[in-house]
Image (tube, grey):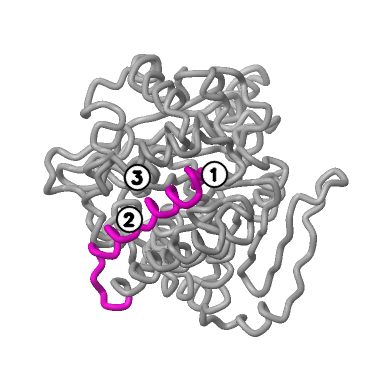
Amino acid sequence: MSRLLTVFLALFAIAIAGGFGAVNAREGYGPGDQDWGFVDVRTGAHMFYWLYYTTANVTSYTQRPLAIWLQGGPGASSTGYGNFEELGPLTLEGVPREWTWVKDMNVLFIDNPVGSGFSYVDSSAYYTTTNKEIALDLVEFMKGFYALHPEFKTVPLHIFCESYGGKMSPEFALELYYAIERKEIESNLKSVALGDPWTSPIDSVLAWAPFLLQMGIVDQNGHDSIESAALRTKNYVDRGLWTLATMQWSLTQSVVLRESKGVDFYNVETPTRGDAYSRQMALLTPEERMIRTLVHFDIDENRDQMLSDLMTGPVTAALNITTGVGWGAQSGATFSAQMGDFMKPVVHIVEELLNNTTLKVGVFSGGLDLICATPGTVNFIADMQWINRTEYLATPRVGINVDGVLEGYEKTAGNFSMFWINRSGHMVPADNPQAMSHILRYYTNYG
C-alpha cells in the first residue's frame, strides 16, 4: 500500500470518527454543528431533541462530555427556554451568548415530557400522568438517541435540570441506571444535578412565608396569610389528596402575589408592576395561573411572545419541522395531565440514588429564587435518609470562589453535594454563569 493511500485512509477514519466534525451534523438555527429530530418513545408519543455539538478546541467532539438539559413545568420547553434564555449558543435576541455550555461540552436539549415544546402526542390518551411514566419515556428516548448517535454511548453523560426537572431527573437517572445494569442500554451515565428543584413540593411551599418575611417583602400579616394558605396545601398533601393539593398550591400562589404586590416567583429582586400584576394574576383561573407561573418563565409577556414567535417561526423553518402540532401547542395539556402527581415528592428517589447507585448527585439553588426557595430545599435535604447523612450534616460549607469573587457555597459528603448560589434566582445558568461553570466542572471535569 502506498504511503499516500495510507495517509488518506487514516484521515478518512478520523473524519468518520468525528475528528473533523460531527458524524450527523447539520446546519440548523444559529452557529455550530447541530442535529435534531423526534424519537417515538411509545405509540402515539413523539419526543423532540436538539443536540449541539461542542465547539471546544478538541480533535473530536466525543472527547467532551454530553450534558442533558431538562426544563421544568411540566410542559416548559428545553429547546426554547433553556436554550435561548439560559445556556444555548444564542440569546433570545439572536446575539451569541458570551458564556454557553456548548463551548465546553456537547449539549442535548430534550422537550420533555411528551407534549412539551416540539414534542407531541397523537391524542390525549398518550400524555404522561406520573413521574414514573416520564422517567420511562426518557429511558426509551435514550435508546432511540443512542441508535441515532452510537458514538455517544461511551461518552460520559451528565443530567442537569431545573425546577420540575428536579422531580423528573432523579427518577430518570435511577431508571436509566437500572436499565444499564440490566444491559438493556449502553450508556456512560455519571451524574445528575438538580437546579432549584421541585423535588419536595410542600417543603418549597412552606418556605414561601418565612422567606418573604425575612426578605422584607411582606409584613407579619402577609406572612400569616401566606402561611395559612400553605398549611392548607400541606393538609391535602398529608391526606394524599394530590389534585386538591395542586389546586391549593395555586391558590397559595395568588395569596403570595396579593400580599407581596406581585413579587416575581423566579427572582425576588426582579422589578415588577406591583399591584397591577397581582390583580392581573388574580383574574386567572387556577389552571391558567399554574401554567402562567410554571410554564412561562418571567412576568415580561413581551419576552414570552418573542420566544414563541422565534420557535414557531425562524426555528421551525430552519429545522424544517413539518410534523407535530407546533411548538408549545400542547404545553397546557401536558401540565394538566400531571396535576394528580404535581405535589408528590420524590425525595425517596434521591435517597435511592444515593444509597444504591454510584452516581454523583447534587442540588444547586439560587438564593433569590422563591418558587423553589433555598430554605425549603435545605430542609428536605436535611431530612433525607442516606448512608452519608451524618457526615453531610456535620460537614461545614466552603466558599465557591471564582476569579476572586465569592459566588456561593458548597458542601459535599459521599456522592452528594449541595451548592448555594449567590446573586441568582431560579435560572442559575443565566443569573450566575460563573457559579454554574464551577458546578459543571465539578461534575463533568471538562477541560
Q: Nearer the viewer, residue 55 or 118?
A: 118
Going by the picture, which residue comes out furthest to the front? 221
- Alpha-carbon distance for marks 1 and 2? 40 Å
- In the structure shown, which secondary structural element does the residue marked by tag 1 occupy? strand
Q: Quadrant of the N terminus?
A: top right
Q: Is residue 285 left or right of residue 54?
A: left
Between marks 1 and 2 in the image, the one whose residue lies nearer the viewer? 2
Q: Disc 3 and disc 2: Cα gap in Å?
A: 26 Å
Tell me the number on the disc at residue 182: none
Q: Earlier in the sequence, mark 3 or mark 2?
A: 3
x then y, percent, for residue 63: 63, 41
Tell me if 27 is positioned left or right of 74 in this view.
right
Q: Position of residue 213 (x, y in %)?
A: 58, 60
Stretch of the chain drawn in magenta: 238-266
Which residue: 44% across, 71% down? 347
Q: Earlier in the sequence, mark 1 or mark 2?
A: 1
Is the magenta region chiefly helix, strand or loop?
helix
Left or right, 109 with respect to 56, comes to left
Figure quadrant of residue 198:
bottom left
Residue 112: give its label.
3
Q: Which residue is mark 2?
A: 251
For label 1, the residue is 66
Q: CA distance from mark 1 to mark 3?
A: 17 Å
- Quadrant in the picture for residue 5: top right
Whole-percent x, y for residue 313 in the image: 35, 16
Q: Nearer the viewer, residue 171 or 164?
A: 164
